[in-house]
């Protein structure tokens, strides 16, 4: 028995259509880095191509090659920029680097150049050219890039002054690089009141069902459902301790259900429930049940005392992620974010794609 990770490609496509309709006539691209947020680059790219998506963003060359294998004519940008020596591989696969330093700009030009993005840092202080380097970058490239881009630091906070400052800084960059498509929007930025959609938006998390509007109702359909079978049930008495180092102690006679997922499968150890901390929950026949004791490498214990007897049998499905427990909630209860839950989904799951 193994856990089954179901990817609803129809919901994925509907999420892309929703965002594309919101920002039209701007182009809606798709970020498919980190194995398409754990959902699988190849099937996700195929589904979005069929829906009309023509521009994709990955993080690294290897991801770009996977996307190119199923999207021969699409535009594919590599967000991590031009790592030393990567130019030949990028050019051979017709992948476009997002150049974020003068060293990268120079190496790309020496290698023969080609379509690329110029990435400007407007406040993230991570990757990106400085605003004052625009003229030098254009001179080195010998012309305008295919795209000029930046990245929000706080777009999920609609009232953050960071957003206003970054939009202003990026406007200055855009004025210095005329007649070039521009992109700054990630998933959450699409929902900012100022609508800084420009020519290209690049949603990622929202496509896969994550909530781009924290604190408000999720406008996206959930895409990922994870079910794990019950391996075994057991009864523990009041005072019995559960799991490594006995971090959870039963306060009543309890029925435990053991399921075959753990931190090797991307379930954070901090999802555990202890005597001092309530951990994440799963659902059994729609009934929420807490994780108890430490999350181990391959197994989790669930307090299934309040679940229906018929639903807690060997082989019965336990919903770890899905309509009852979304990725954002599970992430928050595990002390992390939904992004980490999605991108950490392990290779041991049996993946099932549904249209």
Image (spheres, rainbow, N blue to C red):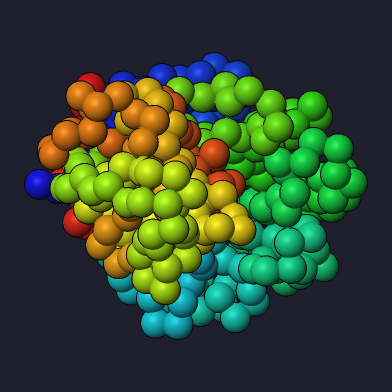
Q: Is residue 303 visible?
A: yes
Res 211 → quadrant: top right
Q: Position of residue 329 (x, y in %)?
A: 54, 39
Residue at x 75%, y 49% (from the top left corner): 154
Q: 244 or 149, which is in the foreground?
A: 244
Q: Position of residue 178 (x, y in %)?
A: 73, 46
From the viewer's perspective, is 308 left or right of 174? left
Residue at x 51%, y 36% (from the top left corner): 210
Q: Position of residue 103 (x, y in %)?
A: 60, 81
From the viewer's perspective, is 230 left or right of 114? left
324 to 61, vertically: above or below: above
Q: 118 or 352, which is in the foreground?
A: 352
Question: How many labels sit on residues?
Answer: 0
Residue at x 59%, y 55% (from the top left corner): 277
282 to 331, vertically: above or below: above
Res 316 → quadrant: top left
Residue at x 52%, y 58% (from the top left corner): 274
Q: Position of residue 8 (x, y in %)?
A: 30, 28
306 to 134, vertically: above or below: above
Res 194 → quadrant: top right
Q: Is residue 42 visible?
A: no
The C terminus, quarter of image: top left
Q: 21 or 231, which is in the foreground?
A: 231
Q: 96 or 251, which is in the foreground?
A: 251
């Amino acid at each position: 028995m193994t856990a089954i990770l179901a990817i609803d490609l129809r919901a994925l496509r509907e999420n892309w259509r929703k965002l594309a309709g919101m920002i039209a006539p701007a182009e809606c691209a798709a970020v498919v880095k980190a194995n398409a947020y754990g959902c699988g680059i190849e099937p996700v790219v195929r589904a979005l191509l069929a829906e009309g998506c023509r521009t994709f963003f990955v993080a690294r060359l290897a991801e770009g090659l996977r996307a190119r294998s199923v999207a021969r004519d699409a535009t594919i940008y590599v967000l991590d920029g031009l790592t030393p020596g990567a130019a030949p591989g990028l050019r051979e696969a017709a992948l476009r680097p997002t150049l974020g330093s003068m060293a990268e700009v120079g190496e790309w030009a020496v290698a023969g150049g080609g379509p690329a993005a110029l990435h400007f840092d407007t406040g993230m202080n991570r990757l990106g050219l400085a605003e004052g380097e625009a003229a030098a970058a254009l001179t080195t490239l010998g012309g305008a890039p295919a795209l000029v881009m930046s990245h929000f630091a706080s777009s999920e906070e609609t009232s953050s002054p960071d957003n206003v400052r970054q939009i202003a800084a990026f406007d200055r960059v855009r004025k210095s690089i005329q007649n070039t498509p521009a992109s700054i929007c990630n998933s959450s930025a699409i929902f900012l009141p100022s609508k800084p959609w420009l020519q290209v938006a690049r949603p990622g998390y929202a496509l896969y069902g994550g909530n781009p509007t924290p604190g408000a109702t999720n406008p996206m359909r959930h895409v990922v459902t994870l079910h794990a079978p019950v391996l075994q049930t057991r009864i523990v008495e009041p005072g019995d301790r559960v799991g490594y180092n006995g971090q959870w102690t039963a306060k009543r006679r309890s029925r435990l259900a053991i399921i075959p997922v753990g931190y090797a499968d991307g379930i954070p150890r901090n999802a555990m429930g202890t005597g001092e901390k309530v951990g994440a929950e799963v659902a059994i026949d729609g009934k929420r049940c807490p994780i108890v004791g430490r999350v181990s490498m391959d197994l989790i214990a669930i307090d299934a005392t309040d679940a229906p007897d018929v639903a807690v049998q060997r082989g019965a499905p336990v919903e770890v992620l899905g309509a009852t427990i979304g990725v954002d909630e599970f992430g928050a209860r595990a002390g992390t974010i939904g992004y980490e839950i999605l991108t950490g989904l392990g290779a041991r799951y049996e993946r099932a794609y549904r249209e």
